[in-house]
Amino acid sequence: MNCLSQQEERLFEAFIILTLARKVLQNDLIVVEKSFFKLKEPYLQLIHSAIGTISKELFEIKKQLNKQRMKIEFGPNDGTFTEFYCYYRGYVKTSRFLNANLKNKVQQRLSQFFVANSKLS
């Protein structure tokens, strides 16, 4: 039984995808900082900018989640699926997402962000 409205579902999914995207960028930032690029500063600026934008979006999503008294927690990851728990209105919704699907959604979101903010287009 799904008691979440469409808006709550979008918040739930956006929170998950943006949290994972920020984690990916933070890991990439560490790799780029340790790399031997001749010109790594543009990459670092791009990653820092992306992390900042994602953090702002997450801040707004968290405000909306708190306003609606929703809480989302990451559950176990068995290598194929990851569980997420959404606490709302006295209920707990457990959702399982295929890791490959999460990866594709995070990749798509990051691609949209980098293309949308490109100075080349």
Image: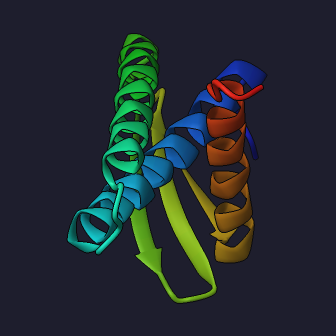
Q: Is residue 37 above or below residue 81?
A: above
Q: Which residue is found at the position 31% from the left and 71% from the top?
A: 31
Find residue 98 and report its image quarter.
bottom right
Find residue 90 and report its image quarter.
top left
Q: Which residue is found at the position 47% from the left and 54% from the top?
A: 20
Q: How many marks?
A: 0
Query: At which x and y percent is residue 108?
Result: 73, 50
Query: At which x and y percent is residue 55?
Result: 36, 30
Q: How is the image coloured?
A: rainbow
Q: Which residue is found at the position 34% from the left and 28% from the top?
A: 52
Query: At which x and y percent is residue 48?
Result: 33, 38
Q: Residue furthest top?
A: 67
Q: Nearer the viewer, residue 119 or 103?
A: 119
Q: Is residue 58 above or below residue 18?
A: above
Q: Horizontally, is 7 left or right of 110 in the view?
A: right
Q: Is residue 87 visible?
A: yes
Find residue 23 and report its image quarter.
bottom left
The quadrant of the image that shows the C terminus is: top right
Q: Is residue 45 above or below residue 118?
A: below
Q: Is residue 91 visible?
A: no
Q: Residue furthest front?
A: 38
Q: Horizontally, is 112 left or right of 89 in the view?
A: right
Q: Nearer the viewer, residue 65 or 92?
A: 65
Q: Horizontally, is 30 left or right of 84 in the view?
A: left
Q: Which residue is found at the position 45% from the left and 14% from the top?
A: 64
Query: At which x and y percent is residue 42?
Result: 39, 43
Q: Nearer the viewer, residue 28 or 97?
A: 28
